[in-house]
Image (spheres, grey):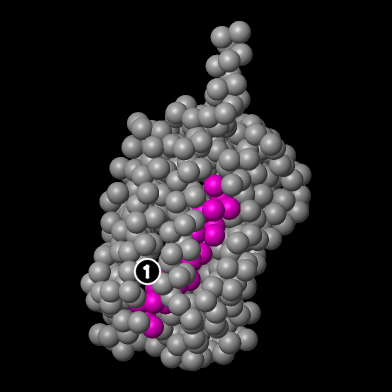
């Protein structure tokens, strides 16, 4: 039987809870319930159950990023599966892998489970980004994506809040929490599969790999974003446990503060991007991240206490929340048919550095943790310079300031 597709233009007649934006919000909530729980427990679990050091955690995150590097494989899957279906199947895989994480408390076992959960996470993120840009109008994209980010932060907030409130009160085991989070994600994904029609975007997507010269700045910013983010994701929380001895309860409380702040500020950032443009907001983000990473290095030089480290961690997350300006920048310069294939290409580019950086920097971490953060500061500053190349009003044919100048010269002639 042929699958019936519902054009986006007809979705206005559906109840709100069955419309595309609601599905995007639902998926945005389902993913972090598993991923946030995994992130909150991981550092303590691997140290307590498997005796990890910086070397092992570096290798674990390198393995975790391999599916991100291979995100271009999404294009092969899309030859036989629609993006909406792939997003929900990926959520199911993420939920299953999260549920069984505590069953494999060894270096090898954790590598395998992490690889499976990462396939679910990265393939979901790849097609989810594509669906957002296809289903949301350009004029409303910054505000709507800001709200979607807020929903995801709210789901993370709920997961972290429950861990903080119940971890010590009920003396929970790692297996109980991992299993519960995974099952919730699975339940949401199954509901979404059954409750929503298959939406059809107005622009058919290219099913082959797309690399266009005019997207070069977007590619570069994706590469730098992936390299810089890996340093933070791998080592910032690990430092809080290794250097300051934070337990699950305390570390999760810190995550809780992060996502509470993100839930409040993400919609505001969406409005700022719409008002001030991607260029200005990205300059603010990268300037802030440069300062934060330098301050991270100073934690070791001046031996600041954990309060300063915690404040820097929250500030780092707040600046990272501006990063979806890269996504809306691409939406403005992209051929509509390029969104799906370019999302896959961009995810691969984003993870090139992620494959080798965590393992390599794990060895540097053992020798000099502050050097790792100085390297991150340099990457953030380079990203700032790249953001200055975005024109004030990006569009097709006006992708960079160089294209804008060329356009101006042609118009003058």
Could you say whether the residue bearing mark 1 is in a helix, strand or loop? helix
Does the magenta-highlighted stretch encompass residue 228? Answer: yes
Could you say which quadrant of the image residue 310 lies in? bottom left
Q: Position of residue 118 (x, y in %)?
A: 59, 68
Numbered marks: total:
1
Q: Residues within 10 Å of mark 1 (few under 14, many from 20)?
A: many
Q: Position of residue 411 (x, y in %)?
A: 58, 11
Q: Residue 297 or 84: which is nearer the viewer?
A: 297
Q: Quadrant of the C terminus?
A: top right
Q: Residue at x 45, y 51 (%)?
A: 381
Please indicate whether residue 171 sits to the left or right of residue 209 in the image: left
Is residue 308 shown above or below 409? below
Could you say which quadrant of the image residue 339 lies in? top right
For the stretch drawn in magenta, what is the main secondary structure?
helix
Please indicate whether residue 209 sits to the left or right of residue 361 in the image: right
Q: Residue at x 59, y 26 (%)?
A: 403
According to the image, label 1 marks what residue?
A: 297
Please indicate whether residue 396 sits to the left or right of residue 213 in the image: left
Q: Find the magenta span and give its range.
A: 221-242
Q: Residue at x 31, y 58 (%)?
A: 315
Residue lying at the far front in this picture: please name it: 301
Q: Residue at x 45, y 77 (%)?
A: 368
Q: Residue 347 or 15: which is nearer the viewer?
A: 347
Q: Position of residue 375 (x, y in %)?
A: 48, 63
* Residue 178 seen anywhere in this rendered image of the structure: no
């Amino acid at each position: 039987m042929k699958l019936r597709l519902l054009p986006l233009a007809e979705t206005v007649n559906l109840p709100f809870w069955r419309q595309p934006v609601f599905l995007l919000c639902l998926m945005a909530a389902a993913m972090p319930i598993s991923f946030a729980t995994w992130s909150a427990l991981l550092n303590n679990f691997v140290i307590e159950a498997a005796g990890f050091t910086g070397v092992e955690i570096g290798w674990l995150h390198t393995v975790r990023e391999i599916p991100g590097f291979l995100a271009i494989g999404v294009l092969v899957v899309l030859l036989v599966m629609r993006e909406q279906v792939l997003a929900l199947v990926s959520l199911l895989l993420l939920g299953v892998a999260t549920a069984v994480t505590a069953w494999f408390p060894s270096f090898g076992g954790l590598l395998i489970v992490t690889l499976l959960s990462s396939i679910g996470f990265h393939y979901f993120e790849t097609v989810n980004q594509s669906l957002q840009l296809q289903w949301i109008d350009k004029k409303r994209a910054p505000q709507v994506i800001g709200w979607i980010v807020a929903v995801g932060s709210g789901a993370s907030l709920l997961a972290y809040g429950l861990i903080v409130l119940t971890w010590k009160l009920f003396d929970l085991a790692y297996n109980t929490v991992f299993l519960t989070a995974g099952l919730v994600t699975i339940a949401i994904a199954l509901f979404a599969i059954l409750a929503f029609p298959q939406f059809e975007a107005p622009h058919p997507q290219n099913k082959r790999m797309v690399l266009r010269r005019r997207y070069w700045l977007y590619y570069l910013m994706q590469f730098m974003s992936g390299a810089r983010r890996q340093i933070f994701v791998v080592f910032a929380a690990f430092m809080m446990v290794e250097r300051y001895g934070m337990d699950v309860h305390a570390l999760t409380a810190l995550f809780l503060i992060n996502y509470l702040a993100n839930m409040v500020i993400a919609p505001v950032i969406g409005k700022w991007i719409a008002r001030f443009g991607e260029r200005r907001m990205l300059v603010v983000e990268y300037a802030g991240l440069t300062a934060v990473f330098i301050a991270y290095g100073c934690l070791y030089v001046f031996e600041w206490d954990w309060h300063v480290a915690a404040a820097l961690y929250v500030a780092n997350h707040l600046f990272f929340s501006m990063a979806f300006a890269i996504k809306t920048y691409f939406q403005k310069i992209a051929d509509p048919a390029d969104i799906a294939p370019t999302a896959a290409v961009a995810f691969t580019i984003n993870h090139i550095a992620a494959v080798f950086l965590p393992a390599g920097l794990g060895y540097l971490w053992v020798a000099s943790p502050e050097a790792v953060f100085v390297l991150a500061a340099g990457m953030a500053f380079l990203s700032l310079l790249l953001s200055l190349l975005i024109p004030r009003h990006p569009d097709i044919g006006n992708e960079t300031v160089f294209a804008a100048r060329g356009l101006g010269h042609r118009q003058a002639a």
